[in-house]
Image (cartoon, rainbow, N blue to C red):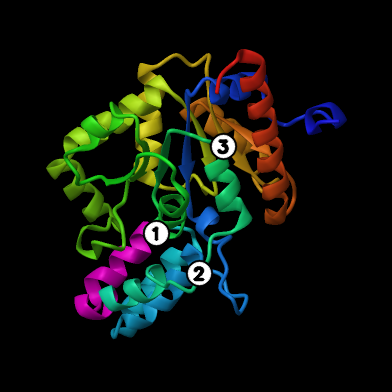
Amino acid sequence: MGLALMSKSIFPDFLINEFARGRCVLFLGAGISATAMSDDGQHPPDWSTFISGAIKLISVKKIQKEARRYLKVGSNTLALQSIINASSRADYLQYVEKHFNNPKYKPSNVHTTIEELGAKIVITTNFDSIFDNYCRSIASQGFKVITYDNESLPDALRSDASLIIKAHGTIDNPQNMIFSKADYHKAKKDYGRFYEILKAIFITNTILFLGCGMADPDLLEILEEVKITASQEKPHYLLTTSGQSETQRKDLLDSYNVETLIYGHRHTDLLPNLIELKELVFERRRILGIH
């Protein structure tokens, strides 16, 4: 008996249908990278841990305290801006390289299940290449990784290749990674066409957010613009734990047209829910005759 028959699914029929018909785009946040693990049981650092360590690069105590205050209240972009402004550029890039370009981290079952879902387009703000490298290693057909500063995105979207779009850049080119508001504004000025294409993807597809805290001001700006432009009858979806308050969930829906799907109380509950989604999508494709 399939999972869909055993208990009521958290996944709306509309989302399953969108996925089955190839109209769902996955958006991966830092929570997905955090599921990777090394042979000695270590996980990549989350944003809070990364920023907390980077603050030590600041030599001026006053600015260190300022950065810690920003981190404490959840203003990650301001904390990062403080670090970038007040630390050695070389030391900071070395710190970034150490944390985002570490080959010891292996893809998790979450990564493999996400790949098996078969989304043609995956967007991520993650700098690391854990998911990218896994997809490259098992790809049986065309597969491309495109960064925001790559002018070939329009052609790649029209090709048969599956895509990973690195919206904040990649550790392969640390000079162009987007960390701060200043980085984002520069990228938007220099690569405005990318953001127009990204907005078009959001308008013409259903987005499923995985491992995202939904606090990225760049992402929220795009969602706000899309909500004004597109129909509000068809929402995007955020798969998350029960940690969000009802007020936060209502704000996401009212302000950004993002419906929250609660998969459990613990992060370890994510994998069984992704497996359930995969089974539901595969069954719907079978019924529709889609291969």
Report, in whole angstroms, how far the alpha carbon at label 3 lies from the one at label 2.
22 Å
Q: Nearer the viewer, residue 157 or 88?
A: 157
Q: Is residue 138 visible?
A: yes
48 magenta-colored: no
The image quarter in which residue 18 lies: top right
Disc assigned to residue 129: 1
Residue 207, horizontal then vertical, whole percent? 48, 31
Q: Mark 2: which secondary structure?
A: loop
Q: Are marks 1 and 2 in contact (CB under 8 Å)?
A: no
- The residue that appears at 75% across and 50% down in the rendered structure is 265
In the image, residue 50 sits, relative to residue 3, either above or below, namely: below
In the image, residue 199 sits, relative to residue 74, either above or below, namely: above
Which residue is the site of mark 2? 105
Report, in whole angstroms, how far the alpha carbon at label 1 lies from the one at label 2.
10 Å
Q: Nearer the viewer, residue 272 or 115?
A: 115
- The residue that appears at 65% across and 42% down in the rendered structure is 274
Q: Earlier in the sequence, mark 1 or mark 2?
A: 2
Image quadrant containing the N terminus: top right
81 magenta-colored: yes
57 left or right of 136? left
Q: Is residue 88 visible?
A: no
Q: Which residues are magenta?
A: 76-92
In the image, residue 101 sits, relative to residue 90, either above or below, namely: above
The image quarter in which residue 196 lies: top left
Disc assigned to residue 202: none
Q: Amino acid at mark 2?
A: Tyr
Q: Amino acid at mark 1?
A: Ser
Residue 32, horizontal then vertical, whole percent? 54, 54
Disc assigned to residue 117: 3
Q: Mark 3: which secondary structure?
A: loop
Residue 171, horizontal then vertical, whole percent? 31, 63
